[in-house]
Image (cartoon, rainbow, N blue to C red):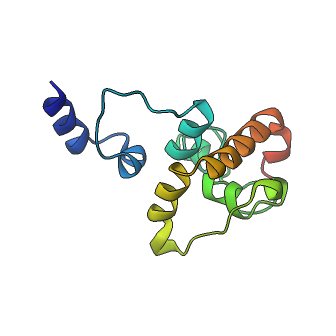
Amino acid sequence: MLEEWQTSWKNGDTGRKIYNIMPSVCLRPTNWIREDFIFFSQHGPFPAYLKRFHLSDSDYCSCGGIGTALHYATECIYTVSWHMKKPAPNFEQEWLKRVANNLVSRHKIRGIIKFICENRYFFRPP
């Protein structure tokens, strides 16, 4: 059963952002909470995600940047309290893995997501 699940996960078309962070299936539950899944799947209150699914006309954050999860974690003026160093584009996947496996970094991510959800009016495009 576990082998079938692993094969299905490895060869699947969906969930690739999470797969790139957690490529192996496991019967042990992850210690992630809602905010972790929102950030690492990049499915949530991010303008880039909303525009991709035609739920918004713009992919811009109200600060003027492209509203991706990485933008909020590294450069948005509204989330500066939780900023982390922005990775070079070719190291973004490795950065996500390291952040996912670091509890201090995940606490920052959780703070960002909670702040965005509680203050959505700040994050509407200009």
The quadrant in which the C terminus is found is bottom right
Relative image position of residue 47 (x, y in whole percent): 66, 47
- Asked if residue 111 is positioned above or below residue 85 in the image, the reply reads above
Q: Residue furthest top?
A: 1
Q: Is residue 5 visible?
A: yes
Relative image position of residue 113 (x, y in whole percent): 70, 40
Q: How many marks?
A: 0
Write the residue at 57% across / 39% down: 36
Question: In this orientation, which residue lies closer to the viewer: 101 or 78?
Answer: 101
Left or right, residue 30 beside residue 42: left
Left or right, residue 72 beside residue 50: right
**Quarter occupied by residue 94:** bottom left
Write the residue at 45% across / 74% down: 90
The quadrant in which the N terminus is found is top left
Q: Is residue 57 visible?
A: no
Relative image position of residue 76 (x, y in whole percent): 77, 60
- Asked if residue 97 is positioned above or below residue 89 in the image, the reply reads above
Write the residue at 45% across / 62% down: 93
Question: In this orientation, which residue lies closer to the viewer: 37 or 45?
Answer: 37
Relative image position of residue 23 (x, y in whole percent): 31, 47
Question: In this orientation, which residue lies closer to the viewer: 112 or 104?
Answer: 104
- Asked if residue 99 is positioned above or below residue 22 in the image, the reply reads below
**Quarter occupied by residue 6:** top left
